[in-house]
Image: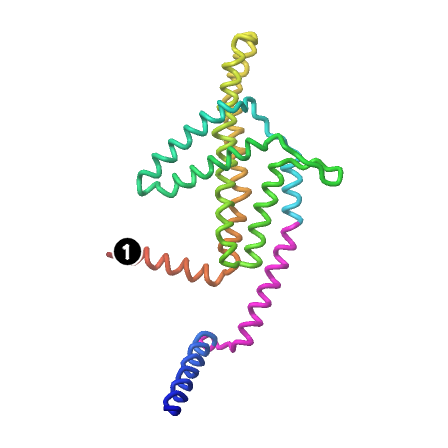
Amino acid sequence: MNQNINSDIVYSLIKINLKTSNSTGSLGFSWKEVLMIKLVWLLVRFAIVYLLLGVIIGVLILTNSSTPRFFSLEVDFIGWISIFWCVVAYVLVRFEPTKEVGKLLFVSTLGALVLLMYIKEHFWLQDMRIHAWTAFLAVIFAISLLFFILPHRNLKPLLFLLPVSACSWFLAWVGYRPASLVIEILGAKGKLPEENIKKVIEFMPEIFLSCLTSGAFMVCLIMPFYIFARWGHDPKGTYQSLTKRLRQIRNARHF
């Protein structure tokens, strides 16, 4: 019986050695060489993050120096606009092709509400006035850089905050700011001369275009960090996954 137990132990050890040799030896590397490669790639990721810190600080300084102007931020106005977007999100969720878009729109509406709640808030850091939206961006960038350096599975759910934040900023600029301007004009119709109101109405297309540009800018500012953190930490795995997906699409077209 002892011989059987010993033979089973030896057999299991051989299986483990075969698995490790196949995983490391398939590329011609030993486990020490694989460990060294991972360590070098970790140092390279640290170097990339270090080089990006200057760019990120510059972006945060620029965004902190600009103050978004929302004309009407009453609670009832924000509530009605939020209900409208929630209804749109609910309709999108009801259909299978747009289900994920509806979920993203619903969560982004909540994010836009948070942004509008703290749009006028600020704090002081070493005689520097830091606005709340700058702190939000700093947290978003920190999450992406942290996951890029340490891509742990427990940190992966936090990456969802990046596309949500991008859509929230876009919604705040495109969905709330133009509507606040329209409500402000309607409220000032009996208080301001007609000539001034007509001049404001003439500038409304330019204001709407400016809001759209600002919203698109925030999306283009945040989403590259999401792509960078989500797929940049493992270029080999990303390439293999991409080629596999393209191969599946090509095979599906043949059928």
55 or 109: nearer the viewer: 109
Assess whether residue 35 is covered by the magenta stretch: yes
For the image shown, how many numbered marks are present on the structure? Answer: 1
**Picture quarter with the C terminus:** bottom left
Assess whether residue 19 is covered by the magenta stretch: no
Chain part drawn in magenta: 25-53
Magenta span: chief secondary structure:
helix
- Tell me residue 47's x, y (percent): 63, 59
104 or 154: nearer the viewer: 154
Q: Residue at x 45, y 39 (%)?
A: 107
Check the image and name the residue furthest to the right. Answer: 127
Amino acid type of the residue that numbered disc 1 sits on in the rendered structure: Ala
254 or 71: nearer the viewer: 71
The answer to which quarter of the image holds residue 84 is top left
Tell me the residue that label 1 is attached to: 252
Residue 246 in the image: above or below residue 80: below
- Tell me residue 35's x, y (percent): 55, 72
- Tell me residue 242's x, y (percent): 41, 58
**Picture quarter with the N terminus:** bottom left
Q: Residue at x 60, y 67 (%)?
A: 40
Helix, strand or loop for disc 1: helix
